[in-house]
Amino acid sequence: MTPDFLKHRFNVAGSALATALRTGFGITAHPAGEKPAKLLELYDFEGCPYCRLVREALTELDLDAMIYPCPKNGGRFRPRVTELGGKAQFPFLVDPNTGRQMYESLDIIDYLFETYAKRPLPIKWRTGSLQKLGSGAASIARGMAGMRAKPSRQPASPLELFSFESSPYARPVRDLLCELEIPYILRSAGRTRLSDWVPPVVRDTVNLQSEPDQHNRIELLERAGRVSIPYLIDPNTGEEMAESEAIIQYLITSYAA
């Protein structure tokens, strides 16, 4: 086993621990009653416990978003948040559909449910202090992953990533995208059916490819012939790929300075 292989396995193990600490948040989707016509814009960084709560809500509501990574010491998008909102505080949501701009994770979640879910805010989101505590524990489990900026080359066009927040394999990819300050369109692909919980390798082994009913999973099945999270699309090079280890290596080779 190579050092890179062991490093990746350790990375995924830490990510799995973070998923366990969130006890099921950010996995399943209960789609919002209304979908925004234009992509929501979220300025955040992966290691931030407050940002994680908003991303969990995006998975739950089955909402896509344009992600502008703002890691500490980052100079690519953090200044824009100060220009727009007056301070470098995260998360920061911009909704081009309504003109709303807002800080504070719980306020953002409340806004998303009121504006797009068309249903009452679930009890779990009313216990804000508990959710912040649990998300903070998940950040500790990840150490410094997704926290600080690393030198990179900015792509001409944003990448696309099919992901759901608590996927232990997608999280390391998002960590690196954040550290490299690479903007990307988050294609939320939360689980909606029991068959979605079957790992891709098991589905391949038994030749089982059930029909998903979540729109991004349907698109992914049509594009790749299977549903495997994460899945990266780079319109700058035409590359598309699954498997977190391969995606991470691609990002390092293509964009790390």
Image (spheres, rainbow, N blue to C red):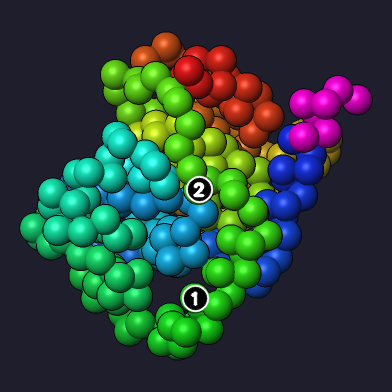
> Tag 2, which secondary structure?
loop
Instruction: Give x and y (percent) for residue 113.
Output: 30, 73
Q: Residue at x 24, y 72 (%)?
A: 111
| Residue 132 numbered mark, or none | 1
Residue that extends furthest to the top in the rendered view of this protein = 237
In this view, the residue in front, 66 or 89, is 89
- 1 or 2: mark nearer the eye: 2
- Using the rendered view, name the quadrant where residue 249 is placed: top right
Give the numbered dot on residue 147. 2
Name the residue furthest right.
Answer: 1
Judge whether residue 142 is colored magenta. no
> Quick check: 239 left or right of 23?
left
Residue type beneath disc 1? Lys
Say whether residue 24 is visible: no
Which region of the structure is painted magenta? 1-7
Q: Residue at x 14, y 58 (%)?
A: 86
| Mark 1 → mark 2, Cα distance in angstroms | 17 Å
Q: What mark, if any, has residue 32 been given in the picture?
A: none
**Which is the main secondary structure of the residues drawn in magenta?**
helix
User: Residue reaching furthest left?
Assistant: 99
- Discs 1, 2 touching: Cβ within 8 Å: no
Q: Position of residue 78 (x, y in %)?
A: 28, 45
Q: Residue at x 25, y 66 (%)?
A: 103
Relative to residue 248, is residue 148 drawn left or right?
left
Q: Residues within 10 Å of mark 1 (few under 14, many from 20)?
A: some
Answer yes or no: is residue 49 visible: yes
Above-or-below relation of 62 to 148: below
Q: Position of residue 137 (x, y in %)?
A: 62, 69
